[in-house]
Image: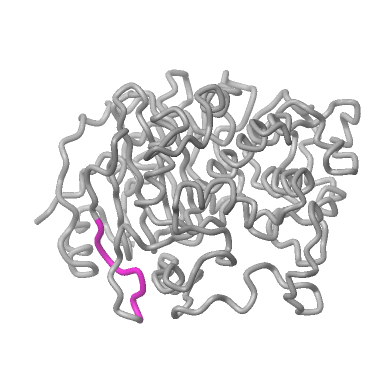
Amino acid sequence: MIKASTWTLALLLLAGPLMAQQKTASPATPAADVPAPSTSTQAPVASVRVSFDRAGVTRVQAQGWADIAGGRRISADDPVRIASISKLVTAVGVMRLVEAGQLDLDADVSDTLGWPLRHPQFPETPISLRLLLSHRAGLTDAAGYYAVPLGGQVRDLLADPRAWDAAHAPGSFFRYANVNFPLIAAVMEKATGERFDQLMDRLVIKPLKLSACFNWATCDQATLARAVVLYDAEHTPVRDDLHGQRPDCVVVAAEDGNCDLSRWRAGDNGALFSPQGGLRISARDLASLGRLLLNQGEVDGVRLLTPASIKTLTQVQWTFDGGNGMTSEEDPSGQGGSGFLCRYALAVMHLATKAPGCHDDPFGDGRQRIGHSGSAYGLLSGLWVDPQRGEGVVYFVTGMPDARGGGHSAYSAIEEMMAQGTLASP
């Protein structure tokens, strides 16, 4: 790890000049119960920051490497596995199906799945898409969520008692759990008969003219050639070291090693295309999703959702009151520390919660922003919009250690710098 005092020198050696400094509000004074500041900072392999407003992109900053071995510099147009921001994009797809009358946010999803999704300790309580999207369905990640092989069924995970929070009924407690989203994808597939990645291509990606895909299956060759390699803290490739080639298997292969996607069956395995974190998208394209939120469902002349749907998507479903939920992700390699999550809508995080124990403001200015963060495989990312000011920012860095407390929030120090745009040029 590189000490914060040597941050500029380290990044200069790694990736050339740092991104130009932007004027930002001064960080808020840390409260007494804010997590202790990080004493060291890892220089990223790549850093990208795109600012935008309702009309379009206003500033692009990109430094470092998309592929170290290939000597390829990063750009804001290179697709990266954006981690949990994928959840927000999946939710946009859900809302399109709700508008089409194919899904109901408050209906029992068992009726669509064709099998009973029930908490074993609270079998009389129906589980809805609204509960799944807001992490209040009583599920945990302790039994796994992503490594369901082709030909397997996501419902098999739920037979493990560890998959359920035995102490809390659905609707009564917030517990961030990735497993909600394979179930959401399964519901989407059963309602439409379409494979999740192809469905999201139809509902969101193609209408907005994005060069994006879930798990590489539907991306074209030109997009594949620009893939951002994800590195761990030692700068070892851990994901998407593609060398311009589509992976031999874009999903978890069947137990016999087979990867024939004709074995897919609607609703059996919503984990196949990683709805919780597997979206590959560039920062510039992700800014279009941010502008969609700012413009009440319309961007560049394309009306994707109604203003009413955007209101539903972003309306807070849970606010931390001291005992009604968990404010950090349970996975030790996951996102943030205590106070990281304090308000949540339908796959939309709200920042700057003014409540004891909440440290959810990486910007440090107290402004109310919405969006989502991401953390996986050495990547840290954020998509945040300020609806009142009509502006937003997308950022990501690669080659990072697990995210934990920064200088004034439960976010890491590098996320605070990326949010604020305070990386100084030499």
- 231 with respect to 305 (left or right): left
Could you tell me how many numbered marks the image carries? 0
Residue extending farthest front: 301
Residue 314, how many percent across, how many down? Answer: 52, 27
Q: Nearer the viewer, residue 306 or 279?
A: 306
Query: Would residue 253 appear left or right of 338 to someone viewing this image?
Result: right
Vertical comparison of 353 with 218: above or below? above
The question of residue 141 being in magenta is answered with: no
Q: Image point 54% across, 22% down: which residue?
A: 308
Q: Is residue 231 visible?
A: no
**Would you say 171 lies left or right of 88 here?**
right
Percent position of residue 159, x then y: 87, 49
Residue found farthest to the left: 426
- Quarter of the rendering containing residue 392: top left
Magenta stretch secondary structure, dominant: strand
The answer to whether residue 155 is visible is: yes
Colouring convention used in this rendered image of the protein: one colour
Quadrant in which the N terminus appears: bottom left
Rendered location of residue 100, percent (x, y): 67, 34
First to last magenta residue range: 62-69
The residue nearer to you, when weighing 291 against 209, is 209
Residue in view at x 23 percent, y 53 percent? 61
Q: Quadrant of the C terminus?
A: bottom left
| Residue 366 image-quadrant placement | top left
On the image, the x and y values in percent for residue 207 come to 50, 47
Q: Residue at left 90%, top 26%?
A: 124
